[in-house]
Image (cartoon, rainbow, N blue to C red):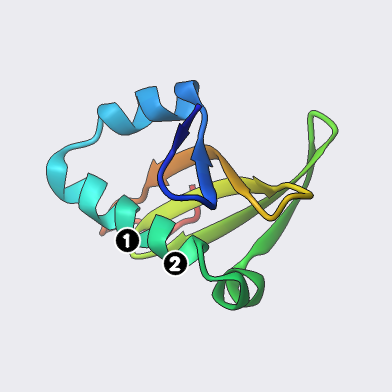
Amino acid sequence: MNSVSGKIIIPEPVQEMLDKFGPSDRKLIAGVFGLLENDLWRDTHKVNFGLILGQQEWAIAENRVTVVFAETNDDKVVVTFVNMRSRFHPSWL
């Protein structure tokens, strides 16, 4: 697992996804990761995705980026999925 910061954890399969994005998309994704570090912002903007494989998952959609994540008991955010939305199709995924 990689850590973007002390709070945001990126598992290897998600890192492989991120490596496929171009530089401008990675910049937008990094900005959303920065927002995820802020507990108040995250709690205000997250959407409940329910239980996935027995784990509570949340999602944030910001700046054409959708990030699905789980929150751990030790105040970490583990990213489980990242997607860039089209500028022409504003859906979540």
Residue 58 to residue 18: above or below: below
Badge 1 element: helix
Task: Rate crowding at label 1 as few (under 14), some (14 to 19) or many (20 or more) other CA atoms within 10 Å.
Answer: some
Outermost residue toward the left in this view: 23
91 w.r.t. 2: above or below: below
Q: Which mark is residue 35?
A: 2
Residue 63: quadrant of the picture: bottom left
Which amino acid type is shown beneath numbered disc 2?
Leu
Packing grade of label 2 (10 A; few <14, some 14-19, many >=20) is: some
The structure residue drawn at horizontal position 60% and vertical position 55%, both measured from the top left corner, is: 59
Residue 12 is situated, as x and y percent measured from the top left of the image, at 47, 22
In this view, the residue in front, 43 or 53, is: 43
Q: x and y percent of residue 76 in the render?
A: 63, 50
Residue carrying label 1: 31
Mark 1 → mark 2, Cα distance in angstroms: 6 Å
Residue ID at (22%, 47%): 25
Q: Position of residue 67 (x, y in %)?
A: 50, 50
Along the line of sight, which residue is nearer the eye, 48 or 71?
71
| Marks 1 & 2, CB-CB < 8 Å contact | yes
- Dot 2: element: helix
Q: Is residue 34 left or right of residue 10?
A: left
